[in-house]
Image (cartoon, rainbow, N blue to C red):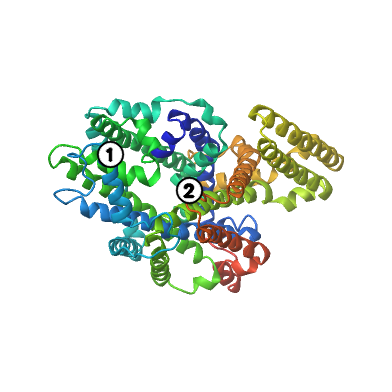
Amino acid sequence: FPAQAFAYGGGTFFIPYLIALFIVGIPLMQLEMAMGQVFRRAVTQSFGRLHPRFRGIGLAAGMVSFGVVCYYNAILAWGNVMFVKSFYSEMPWDVSNVEGTEVLSKPVDHFVNKVLMFPPSDDHFPRVIPAGLYAGAVFMWASIWLILIKGQDFISKAVWVTVLAPVVMLFVLIIQGATLPGAKEGVKAYIGRWDLSQLSDGNMWVDAFGQIFFSLGTGFGVMPAYASLNPRNSNIIKDAFIVSACNCLFSFLAGFAVFTIIGFFSHETGISIDDLRDEGVLAGGSLAFITYPAGLSMLSGAGGNAMCVIFFIVFYFLGLDSAFSLVEAAVLNMREVAVFARYSRAVLTSAVCAVGFVLTGPYLLDVGSAIVDVVDAYLASLGLLFVGFLECLVAGWVYKKHDSYHQTGTLAGIIFDVGSWVGFFFFTVLSLTLADTGMESGPVIGTSIGVGLIIILGSWVTALLLAKSKLGNANDAAYYLFLHGPDCLKNTINGVITDGAPNNWTINRIWIINLKFVMTPLLFFLLVLRCDTYAESGGPYSSSYPYTYLQVLGLLSFVVVFILFAVGFFFPELYADPKLKVASGKGSTTTN
């Protein structure tokens, strides 16, 4: 988060970030957690209750979780190696006694050539297997397995450590950083610069929404899986809001811990923060594994070692907390499908961890960081947007559709739905097409919105007239066309969570209007925008890593996610709820 905020003009990034949080992040978090709690099932069957053809959302989300945790553990393995080296009397990235170009070249050389062992730029294929990274990955997967194999009670206790310990240590880092010379300039670079011209960059908006998805955990299947273990009348809407707000506040505070040290590093070395950005050491992994540890190493005495140890402990705990949640989500969603339900939780968890470790292997090779970048772009960006869009689509546009058509007449319903989505599609395609011609952003948006609105409003008016002629009442016609499905879902959720707890937070009509007419088309637009960006550039990071096999691996990871959903869409019986089958055989359809 801090690196993305800085990359897109400092404070400017907070505009799309906060919009993404309140328009999509919090509402989608509330939807996912409420669905899991109300239906007492993970994504596969909770969203499958809205329509059986959308059960595949769960396995698609599970694949995103599993795919991400495989390379996520490779990144954490980098941190584990750095953690061990933090105990060296002279850390390999220590720049406290060097000058000139070596201030940057020493930590860069250590991370790139000693930790990653990245091959020369003209070498296309992996040739080295860094043993230290494999040891770090073994430690990560063993940690995950030991936590998950103990069961839900142990997980709930582990979370107290993996969440609270990093919070305490983060404040130690912030307080330490704030006392250092140059900290003020670092904070200014983080939130004090407002380059509003960046708002016209579509990639910033997609990255802001992607950051919200990745940070909050929406789209991974984690939240419905854990919420399914709650009592049905827990105050889940309020809890989702608090969790989302606290998560983003933590990310925001983490930026101060990072950029106070960056400001200190700049002050001590005489290299401006802008020059550090131009050198590429303030972006992504470079910030966490090169510049930040180098900045900490400049603290006097053993302070540098101590602060590096604390930083990598924070890194481990935060990563572990996310990693075992991702694995648990994948396991719980798999167990909601008959083919996996026959295996015990322990067996399935062990199998997933074993396969996950094997698949982490390629990310640990000397070209592993390149594979991480490309696969991450397809899974954590494209995959999460895809899952989020499907969740909003089935909740806002598909649920109770048969009932709506029955009330309004099939023709009116089809005209409304098709016209709406043709309008959304024209707006999306036209805006991207006009932007490619070099037209200014203002006319592009105006023209695209105009054409889209003409199509949408024309279909809405036509559908309303037809529905009114059948129902005899314009209000009823509007209700069944615009709101019936999501309103029924709202009533179901509110009825369950307030049963015996009337003071619990509930969702309102504004929430469902946002779900149907803002979140769903917006995620569709961002999904198409990201696909268009990748298509035009030849794939993510294609200029940095011009290796075809990397793009194939990345694209293949997303294709698997898509296929898992498509199989369930066309063959919903393959993903049927095994608990429902058992209950049906006993003469009951009760699942709770």
Give the residue type that dot 2 points to.
Asn
Q: Is residue 217 above or below residue 132?
A: above
Residue furthest to the front: 122
Disc 2 and disc 1 in contact, CB within 8 angstroms = no
Q: Quadrant of residue 574?
A: bottom right
Where is residue 369 drawn, in percent x and y? 40, 55
Q: What residue is at 13 percent from the left and 42 percent from the top? A: 302
Q: Quadrant of residue 284?
A: top left
Circle 1 residue: 101
Residue nearest the observer in this picture, 551 or 341: 551
For mark 1, give the secondary structure: loop
Asked if residue 220 shows in the view, the reply is no
Dot 1 alpha-carbon crowd within 10 angstroms: few under 14, some 14 to 19, many 20 or more:
few
Give the residue type that dot 1 points to.
Thr
Residue nearest the observer in this picture, 249 or 137: 137
Is residue 444 found left or right of 542 in the rendered image? right
Asked if residue 275 shows in the view, the reply is yes
For mark 2, give the secondary structure: loop
Q: What residue is at 56 percent from the left and 47 percent from the top? A: 493
Is residue 572 found left or right of 467 in the rendered image? left
Q: Is residue 405 above or below residue 132?
A: above
Circle 2 residue: 233
